[in-house]
Image (cartoon, rainbow, N blue to C red):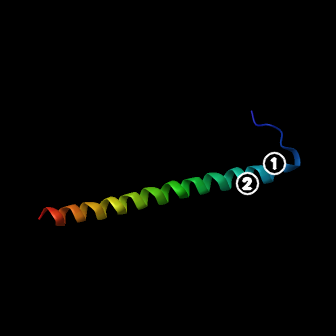
Amino acid sequence: MMPDLGKYAFAVLNSYGVTVVLLLAIVAISVRRARKVKSALDEIEDRRGN
């Protein structure tokens, strides 16, 4: 049930594709950064506890 995009199909589908890739990249970067920060905080807590 895809609408007829006519001569703009290539541009519209490419825009959707780029958007999905960028959103996935943002999520991946955010998850990686959160893990790194959590690891650093855990290390600080461990040093503080000793």
Residue 4's place in the image compared with 35, above or below, is above
Residue 14, percent from left and from top: 73, 54
Location of mark 2 (residue): 14
Residue under the image location 67 percent in, 56 percent down: 18
Residue under the point 77% across and 50% down? 12
Q: State left or right for residue 7 relative to residue 2.
A: right
**Image x and y of residue 37, in percent:** 35, 62
Pick out the residue farthest to the right: 7
- Residue 34, image x and y in percent? 39, 57
Disc tally is: 2
Q: Quadrant where the C terminus lies?
A: bottom left
Q: Secondary structure at mark 2?
A: helix
Residue located farthest toward the left when viewing the structure as drawn: 50
Label 1 vs 2, first from the N-terminus: 1
Question: Disc 1 residue type?
Answer: Ala
Distance from disc 1 to disc 2, alpha carbons, whole Å, reads 8 Å
Please state the horizontal and vertical placement of residue 29, each as a whole percent of the image. 48, 60
Closer to the camera in the image, 38 or 17: 38
Which residue is labeled 1 in the image? 9
Residue reaching furthest top?
1
Amino acid type shown at disc 2 = Asn
What is the quadrant of the N terminus in the image?
top right
